[in-house]
Amino acid sequence: QVQLVESGGGLVQAGGSLRLSCAASGRDFNARVMGWFRQAPGKEREFVATIHWSGGSAYYADSVKDRFTISRDNAKNTTYLQMNTLKVEDTAVYYCAARRRVPIATMAREYDYWGQGTQVTVSS
C-alpha cells in the first residue's frame, strides 16, 4: 500500500512561517509528481504547489507564489512545503498528493494518492 503522511501543521501568527513535510512509503509507490493542495472550511480543495519527482519543474498557485516553496528530498522520500509570510487566508487543511504520471498537474483529480491532511491555522 502507498502511504503519504503529512506533518508540520499548527497555529502561527500572520507573517510567520511553517514547513510542512510529506513522507511517502509503500512497495508500490512510483510517483513522478508531488503536489500540495489545501481546503478551507466551506470551500473546495484548491491547488497550492507541485513539483516533478526530480526536484525540478515546480509550479505554484498565484495566491502563494513568492511566499511558498515546494521541494523534494529523494533520499528521504519526502516532499516539503516551506510557507513564509503566512496570511489569515492561508488557514486550511493542507494535503499532500502524488501522481504516477508526468507532467506536473494542478487539478486534484489528476493525482492518484492522498495524505490525511494537516491543519494550518494562521491567526491575525
Image (spheres, helix red, strand yellow):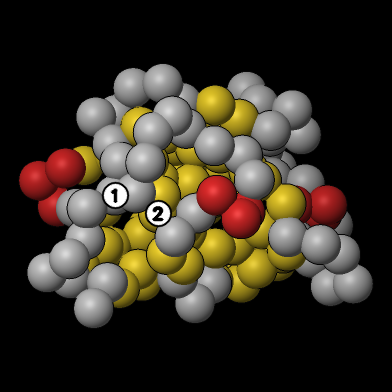
Are there few (<14), some (14-19), or many (20+) residues within 10 Å of tag 1?
some
Locate residue 5, reporting x and y percent. 36, 71
Looking at the rendered structure, the kind of residue marked 2 is: Ala
Residue 64: image x %, image y %?
68, 34
Which quadrant of the rendered structure holds the N terminus? bottom left
Residue 8 visible in rendering: no
> Mark 2 or 1 closer to N-term?
1
Q: Residue at x 17, y 66 (%)?
A: 28
Q: Nearer the viewer, residue 67 or 102?
A: 102
Which residue has dot 1 on it? 31
Q: Which residue is mark 2?
A: 98
Up-down: is 8 above or below 59? below
Mark 2 and mark 1 in contact? Answer it, CB < 8 Å. yes
Q: Residue at x 62, y 54 (%)?
A: 108
Residue 81 or residue 116, whichever sits in front = 116
Q: What's the residue at 86%, 64% (across, down)?
A: 43
Q: CA distance from mark 2 to mark 1?
A: 6 Å
Kind of residue indicated by mark 1: Ala
- Say which of 37 and 7 sits in front: 37
Left or right, 12 with respect to 57, comes to right
Q: Residue furthest right?
A: 42
Question: Does residue 100 appear left or right of residue 63 in this picture?
Answer: left
Which quadrant of the structure image shows residue 3?
Answer: bottom left
